[in-house]
């Protein structure tokens, strides 16, 4: 037998998320969500219990406080730049656009029987513009933004009732746009619920750390069940494929000390694999039994939950990848990263925000994920956050981003030769958007520059960066190759 490995065509794409991109936070009947008032909430510290995100007083103040600038309320003003942005993405030539729907735009409080007509109208326009452009649609059904009402009145995802509301929201999406959406992701980075319960499950205040772990895992469990139920319903109603998504951190042991390596196994299990294991294998992995027992974590899992999880696993696996991380059993110098603080790797350079740049880590991750699940993979987020400079002549020279993309794409191709089944690569924040972690507009990922600063000052005009031409040519040459 002659052996032959080969590169295959993959979908090249770009992504945004509603709360970081749309703006229009109080337009078209949209309800307030957890991102609209997040900087305010994070700074206020008068909650009485861990399960309560807000006091009535702070919500009312936040609602009144329209003049104060919160980056999430303006996003990139996508709400008013829809046609122009889709046109730019078309010119860029991407095959697939990943976007999210704002739950609170469709269901302002989250628990209504009927959706908000203006919200439907808005997304009708969004989806029809994308469809006209010829791009495939990758929809994140929720990306870190929960109707605030659900947090205030139901305790966020701690409450099982949210599954029902979420299914209603999903059914509306299927009925309205199910014939044109190609890929669905019920939850963005579902493991974020574990690191950042505020973002992930709309649950707790930053000040309440350490979180009540049983509540965090109960909330995550409700999201797992919601995700499986969405897949169950979706497989009956629509043609699209359903995935799961985790943030991947690609762990390396600091040394060959067996304890560093054992720490890698446990960190990777709980931080990365746990959520993906439940959603792709359909049951809780054994290693979590020990984790829960040692921490006295308890939560409700019904027999029906177990059935739903078992019978409705993800069709594909996806992950975000920005950095690799290091595990060490001894205290070493630390650096920040996407959702996690990690040990510094002496072999790698890091971004201004401390995220360690590691293209080879992407190949390692692709191999590990594929080896574990044997399902097709989307790299649903990757990119470089940097402070780009808009020159007087309105050009942006981001050669560092081109370098970053080039090196990561090379590793994707290596992973294909390793035999990994890759469906697509989706560049994060293809048009500049507000940073989820730092709440800054000036941490930019895009190949399209949006003229706005951290205080919301600027014209919000769009300008192509040097990386725009580069990505465009790259995609074009890929199309010619296959
Ligand atoms: C992921 C989130 C995104 C995103 C990205 C980059 O965790 O899914 O919403 O923003 O990280 O992070 P940041 O915006 O903090 O740079």
Image (tube, rainbow, N blue to C red):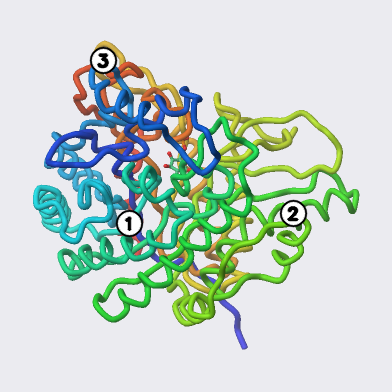
Which residue sits at x=60%, y=84%?
2
Between the C-alphas of marks 1 and 2, the distance is: 32 Å
- Mark 2 is surrounded, within 10 Å at the Cα level, by few (under 14), some (14 to 19) or many (20 or more) other residues, namely few
User: Of circles 1 and 3, which is in front?
Assistant: 1
Question: Which of the marked residues, 1 or 3, is nearer the chain's N terminus?
Answer: 1
Q: Residue 295 carries which label?
A: 2
Between the C-alphas of marks 2 and 3, the distance is: 47 Å
- The answer to whether 60 appears left or right of 348 in the picture is left
Q: The residue tagged with tag 3: helix, strand or loop?
A: loop
Q: Residue 141 carries which label?
A: 1
Please state which of residues 392 and 4 is positioned toward the viewer in this rendering. Answer: 392
- Picture coordinates of residue 347, whole percent (x, y): 72, 35
- Picture coordinates of residue 481, whole percent (x, y): 35, 61
Determine which quarter of the picture holds residue 459: top left
User: Of circles 1 and 2, which is in front?
Assistant: 2
Q: The residue tagged with tag 2: helix, strand or loop?
A: loop
- Residue at label 3? 457
Q: Which mark is residue 336?
A: none
- The answer to whether 127 appears left or right of 438 in the picture is left
**In the rendered image, is residue 399 in sight?**
no
């Amino acid at each position: 037998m002659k052996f032959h490995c080969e590169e295959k065509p993959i979908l090249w794409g770009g992504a945004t998320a509603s709360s970081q991109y749309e703006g229009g936070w109080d337009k078209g009947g949209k309800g307030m969500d957890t991102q609209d008032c997040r900087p305010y909430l994070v700074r206020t510290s008068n909650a009485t219990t861990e399960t309560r995100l807000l006091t009535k007083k702070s919500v009312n103040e936040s609602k009144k406080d329209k003049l104060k600038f919160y980056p999430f309320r303006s996003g990139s003003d996508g709400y008013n730049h829809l046609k122009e942005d889709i046109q730019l993405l078309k010119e860029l030539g991407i095959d697939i656009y990943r976007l999210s729907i704002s739950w609170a735009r469709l269901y302002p409080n989250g628990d209504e029987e009927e959706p908000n007509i203006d919200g439907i109208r808005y997304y009708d326009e969004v989806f029809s513009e994308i469809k006209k452009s010829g791009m495939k649609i990758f929809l994140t059904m929720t990306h870190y933004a929960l109707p605030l009402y659900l947090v205030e009145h139901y305790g966020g995802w701690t409450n099982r009732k949210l599954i029902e509301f979420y299914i209603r929201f999903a059914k509306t999406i299927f009925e309205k746009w199910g014939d044109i959406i190609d890929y669905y992701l019920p939850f963005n980075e579902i493991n974020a619920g574990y690191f950042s319960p505020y973002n992930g499950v709309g649950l707790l205040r930053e000040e309440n750390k350490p979180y009540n772990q049983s509540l965090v895992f109960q909330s995550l469990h409700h999201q797992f069940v919601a995700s499986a139920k969405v897949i169950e319903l979706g497989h009956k109603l629509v043609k699209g494929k359903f995935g799961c998504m985790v943030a991947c951190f690609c762990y390396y042991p600091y040394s060959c000390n067996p304890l560093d390596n054992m720490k890698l196994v446990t960190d990777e299990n709980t931080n990365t694999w746990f959520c993906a294991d439940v959603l792709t294998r359909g049951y809780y992995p054994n290693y979590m039994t020990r984790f829960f027992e040692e921490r006295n974590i308890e939560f409700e899992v019904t027999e029906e939950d177990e059935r739903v999880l078992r019978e409705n696993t993800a069709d594909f696996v996806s992950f975000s990848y920005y950095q690799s991380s290091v595990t060490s059993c001894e205290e070493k110098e630390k650096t920040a990263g996407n959702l996690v603080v990690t040990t510094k790797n002496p072999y790698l350079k890091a971004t201004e925000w401390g995220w360690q740049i590691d293209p080879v880590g992407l190949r390692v991750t692709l191999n590990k994920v594929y080896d574990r699940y044997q399902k097709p993979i989307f790299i649903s987020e990757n990119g470089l956050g940097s402070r780009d400079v808009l020159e007087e002549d309105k050009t942006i020279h981001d050669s560092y981003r081109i370098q970053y993309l080039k090196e990561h794409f090379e590793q994707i191709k290596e992973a294909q030769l390793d035999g990994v089944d890759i469906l697509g690569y989706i560049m994060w924040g293809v048009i500049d958007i507000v940073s989820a972690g730092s709440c800054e507009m000036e941490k930019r990922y895009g190949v399209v520059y949006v003229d706005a600063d951290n205080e919301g000052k600027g014209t919000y005009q769009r300008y192509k960066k040097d990386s725009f031409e580069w990505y465009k040519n790259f995609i074009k040459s890929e199309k010619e190759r296959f």
